[in-house]
Image (cartoon, rainbow, N blue to C red):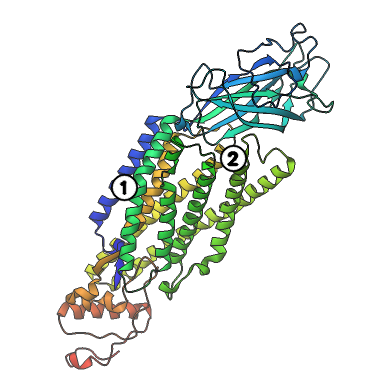
């Protein structure tokens, strides 16, 4: 009978394997923490208020730079005499101070922070709409200073909420207003960007509270170059390793006379999605403008999470339930569990995918601008949160039951010979260690899912350490490598076929060999048992086995076909 490597691996080799993988995990954790503190950086830039005499703001070749005719104070009567909000353009150059972006920084998110001043005798409504007419242009450092190329234009509505402390009404004070997400660039291909913003007031019902605006700031959020270099380098290293171990694992499966079981299929699927995620296609963004790279990343992450969470369900269920025919199980048996996992992952993927689809067309667009779109997006996220929460609670419960099932196997150990007792104790110990690693991986995955959703909100100032992001990514790879290596079929044959001396031991005759990859309980004792008069200690082992089953109150009888080989008077058929 063919077993998996975990069953035949010695404790020493298993310890060496685990220690090496833990050292690899620690190295990745330290690299992520020492190279850079956080994956992203934030920089706040004050806009320059320029005077614009042109009425056609949508002109694609007309751009205002910070070297324009400035208006120092919007609330100084002499500066704005005879002007209205249509003559004011807020100009922001990114990055400031003559610096340049790097293509390694990958993405750029712009969030507006508007200062609204309190004027005596007038109060703002708490919630109001603000119409923003924005234009975005780009240039490379080799281009002339005056050359700016149009990138995108949009007139979007943002919902703004401002509050004011009624206890402080002496002089002018600023309102406490929410920030407004403005744009998101998923491919930072050019060196410099120029943003022109106008708050139109052609309609009396539009932008009624523009007169309260004092300053407009842009909070830029972009990826750190050092973090991206480390992440891409790890992908370039992990990708061939994952593919190589997958090929090695499948070759061992292919050499068997039986078809692959469900757990082996699931291992191939989850390792395949991990390899797809490791594929370093982001290196192409260093050469080509690929604003759709975020869509591909959403698909890759969605497939990986779906495969990994589905694998854990099958992995836990296969070891928690007594399997009558473990090699005949199919994924359809687990459809109630897998379907819920699939719906939850697809709900999260749908929100991110729709957001990035519209931003490929125009970076100023967003699914969060209208109440209807916001309600639908929140519904999908809430549904995904509920399903994922139920999933992890159920998964922790199933893993706990698996621990209990394997600990109860120790009750069968007195029936085994000393050699077999050591063998099965080692198998149970190694499998419990694998379950412990699974619990750690599940916990970090849950934390990563929650933090990744919170990090996507540009309004929340949430900073996740680089060591956690790099460490979690390395942990998924190392965990999948471990599963592929220890769950692969072993080339060794079990002892009942290779060792004649132990062939008739109590444990090998009272129960068939246990496959810990698909079965969680020792099989029932055989209906008949034959005794060979080879060694006296073997006869003693059989007698101990009989005494054990009699004490348990279980039926036990020896086969009649071999009674002639037993010395007369020694034992009779039970």
Residue 156 placement: quadrant: top right
Q: How many marks?
A: 2
In the image, taking residue 254 as reference, residue 150 lies left or right, namely right
- Residue at coordinates 31% horizontally, 47% vertically from top-left? 21
Residue that badge 2 annotates: 360
Residue 325 placement: quadrant: bottom left
Identity of the residue furthest to the top in this view: 78
- Residue at coordinates 66% horizontally, 37% vertically from top-left? 365
Secondary structure of the residue carrying numbered label 2: helix
In the image, 292 versus 343, the foreground residue is 292
Q: Is residue 489 above or below residue 500?
A: above
Q: Position of residue 441 (x, y in %)?
A: 43, 49
- Separation of disc 1 and disc 2 at Cα? 40 Å
Secondary structure of the residue carrying numbered label 1: helix
- Residue at coordinates 33% horizontally, 82% vertically from top-left? 526
**Label whose residue precedes the other's in the sequence (1 or 2):** 1
- Residue at coordinates 40% horizontally, 39% vertically from top-left? 232
């Amino acid at each position: 009978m063919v077993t998996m490597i975990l069953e035949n691996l010695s404790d020493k080799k298993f310890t060496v394997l685990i220690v090496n993988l833990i050292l690899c995990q620690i190295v990745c954790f330290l690299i992520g923490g020492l190279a850079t503190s956080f994956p992203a950086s934030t920089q706040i830039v004050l806009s320059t208020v320029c005077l614009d005499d042109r009425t056609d703001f949508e002109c694609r070749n007309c751009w205002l730079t910070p070297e324009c005719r400035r208006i120092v104070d919007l609330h100084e009567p002499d500066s704005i005499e005879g002007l209205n909000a249509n003559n004011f353009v807020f100009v922001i150059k990114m990055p400031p101070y003559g610096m340049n972006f790097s293509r390694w920084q990958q993405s750029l998110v712009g969030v507006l922070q508007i200062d609204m001043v309190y004027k005596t005798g007038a109060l703002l409504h708490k919630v109001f709409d603000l119409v923003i007419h924005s234009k975005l242009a780009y240039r490379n450092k080799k281009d002339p200073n005056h050359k700016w190329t149009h990138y995108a234009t949009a007139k979007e509505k943002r919902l703004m909420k401002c509050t004011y402390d009624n206890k402080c009404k002496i002089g002018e004070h600023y309102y406490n207003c929410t920030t407004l997400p403005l744009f998101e660039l998923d491919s930072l291909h050019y060196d410099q960007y120029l943003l022109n913003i106008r708050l139109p007031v052609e309609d009396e019902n539009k932008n009624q509270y523009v007169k309260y605006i004092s300053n407009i700031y842009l909070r830029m959020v972009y990826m750190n170059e050092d973090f991206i270099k480390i992440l891409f380098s790890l992908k370039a290293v992990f990708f061939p390793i994952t593919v190589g171990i997958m090929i090695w694992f499948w070759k061992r499966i292919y050499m068997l006379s039986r078809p692959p079981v469900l757990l082996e299929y699931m291992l191939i699927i989850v390792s395949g999605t991990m390899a797809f995620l490791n594929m370093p296609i982001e290196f192409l963004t260093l050469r080509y403008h690929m604003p759709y790279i975020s869509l591909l990343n959403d698909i890759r992450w969605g497939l990986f999470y779906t495969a990994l969470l589905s694998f854990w369900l099958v992995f836990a269920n296969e070891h928690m339930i007594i399997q009558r025919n473990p090699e005949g199980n199919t994924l359809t048996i687990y459809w109630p569990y897998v379907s819920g996992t699939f719906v939850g992952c697809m709900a999260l993927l749908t929100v991110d995918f729709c957001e990035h689809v519209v931003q490929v067309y125009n970076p100023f667009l967003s699914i969060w601008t209208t109440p209807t779109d916001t309600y639908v997006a929140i519904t999908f996220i809430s549904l995904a949160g509920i399903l994922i929460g139920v999933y992890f609670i159920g998964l922790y419960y199933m893993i706990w039951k698996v621990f209990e099932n394997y600990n109860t196997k120790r009750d069968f150990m007195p029936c085994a010979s000393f050699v077999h007792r050591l063998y099965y104790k080692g198998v149970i110990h190694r499998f419990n260690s694998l379950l412990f690693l699974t619990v750690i991986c599940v916990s970090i995955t849950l934390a990563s899912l929650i933090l990744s959703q919170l990090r996507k909100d540009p309004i929340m100032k949430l900073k996740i350490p680089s060591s956690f992001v790099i460490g979690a990514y390395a942990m998924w790879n190392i965990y999948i490598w471990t599963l592929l290596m220890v769950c692969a079929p072993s080339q060794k044959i079990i002892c009942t076929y290779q060792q004649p001396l132990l062939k008739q031991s109590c444990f090998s005759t009272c129960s068939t060999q246990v496959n810990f990859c698909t079965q969680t309980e020792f099989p029932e004792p055989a209906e008949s048992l034959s005794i060979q008069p080879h060694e006296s200690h073997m006869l003693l082992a059989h007698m101990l086995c009989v005494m054990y089953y009699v004490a348990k109150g279980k039926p036990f009888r020896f086969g009649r076909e071999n009674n002639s080989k037993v010395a007369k008077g020694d034992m009779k058929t039970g």
